[in-house]
Amino acid sequence: MVNVEEKKIDESSTPTAPLPVDREWISKLLKRYPNPNSRRQDKALVVAPMVDASDLPFRLLCRRYGANLCYTPMIHSRLVVDSKTYREKFTGTWLETADRPLIAQICGSDPDDFLKAARLVEPYVDGIDINCGCPQGIARRGDYGAFLLEQEDKLLKLVKHLVANLTVPLSVKVRLLPDPETNPHKLNDPSYKGFDTPAASLALYGKLVDAGVHLLTIHGRTRKQKQDMTGVADWETIRKAVELYGDRIPIFANGSIEHYSDVEECLRTTNCDGVMSSESLLEFPPIFYKTPQSPPSQRTIGRLQLAEEYMDLAKKYPPNKGGQGSGLKCIRIHVHRFLHKDLQEDTEFRQKIIADKSLSDLEESLELCRQKHTRENHSVGDEALSWYRRHRDAKVQRDIQSERNDAEDIDECGDCYTGGNMFGVADGEEDGDY
């Protein structure tokens, strides 16, 4: 482990020239930090950046089961600079090779604040990522995430400032551009053909590449496609982006990854350099594992086993003490996703986990789940994704609002968690406008 205070960071230093774009920098990282548990060694199998979800113990669990590149949770640029409590959460503890390769995702739109934040973490990671993916209202208020994509001049100014001053590669996680607010004059204009989302998106991506970014991760949905409007990711536009810009920088695809077969299909369709997953990994981290875990009969690693292994890692690397999560709430969120099917079937068990106030309480709940599985002759091979399909499969639809009322710690998108105090800073240290 490395403590951030052990290294001195000269915030006034700047590179003599922008870091050259190396088309092969991702493949070199995968060779430098090989993961023998991965299904692929030539492609990046990526854990997405997720607030209160891609915390250190969860990343280590995903690496154990095949992920070969991870992102940190989203780091708020202003808070990491201004709030000591928040800064210690993200810069208190970094692992050496056990948690590499690693890219730190930061949100914000102010070039100076963003650069200050990036310099705090760049000595410990392999790249810095700009969050242009979060679709939540909190991102609109904070002027970051997917809403920054719709402010081209501001985004390109930020990118150019960072490219000129960072010592590690810069990536941007983007979505497709949505149809802007309808101009009422166009409603009566027969020549108006509608907004061309793929064309507009590809044009913006080209400008980002020209501005010097080293990597693009493309989530094949607009910011409006979330919850019950999620829909299928647009891999075709990602394929076109690879055709246009893939000879200059690596490109990752994100969206509609449920099982490893989707990973292979996405790679074939897009010819991208890697596939990023968020929600399916949150429920079942071994989708990238070297040993196939495809349902309904190939699964050998059970959801309860994953919950127990995560708990062990969380005890070793507490999410609120360098683990980059919000403590017990973060742990309980993960347990909820792992055991979603059990929680849906057993209301009493669900209420207990919601009420658990300590690690020992959660461990007791896991033991109750184990006893239940034993009584019912539970078969791991019959398990399938449940939480992942909550907005996707009519067969598992339930009263989502009721569940939200019962458990505030259920998130609604892979780009940003908005339940409770999402930035995990002490009361009074933030104004809530992020």
Image (cartoon, rainbow, N blue to C red):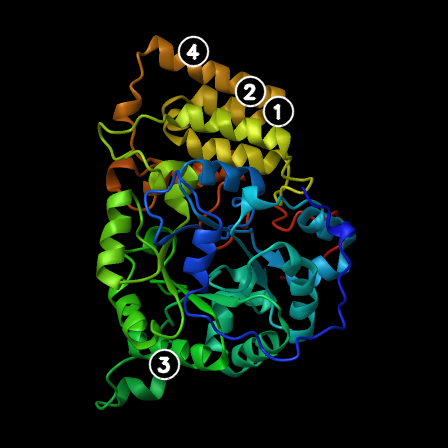
Cα distance between the residues tagged 1 and 2 = 6 Å
**Amino acid type, label 2:** Glu
Q: Are marks 4 and 3 in contact (CB under 8 Å)?
A: no
Q: Are marks 2 and 3 in contact (CB under 8 Å)?
A: no
Q: Specify whether 15 is left or right of 343.
A: right
**Amino acid type, label 3:** Ala
Residue depicted at x 55% and y 28%: 311
Q: Residues within 10 Å of mark 1 (few under 14, many from 20)?
A: some
Q: Are marks 4 and 2 in contact (CB under 8 Å)?
A: no
The picture quadrant where one finds residue 128 is bottom right
Label 1 sits on residue: 359
Label 3 sits on residue: 203
Cα distance between the residues tagged 4 and 2 = 12 Å
The picture quadrant where one finds residue 241 is bottom left
**Precedes in sequence: disc 2 or disc 3:** 3
**Amino acid type, label 1:** Leu
In the rendered image, residue 82, in percent from the top left (x then y), is placed at 76, 60
Q: Which label was assigned to residue 266?
A: none
**Precedes in sequence: disc 1 or disc 4:** 1
**Amino acid type, label 4:** Gln
In the rendered image, residue 146, in percent from the top left (x then y), is placed at 47, 67
Q: Are marks 1 and 4 in contact (CB under 8 Å)?
A: no
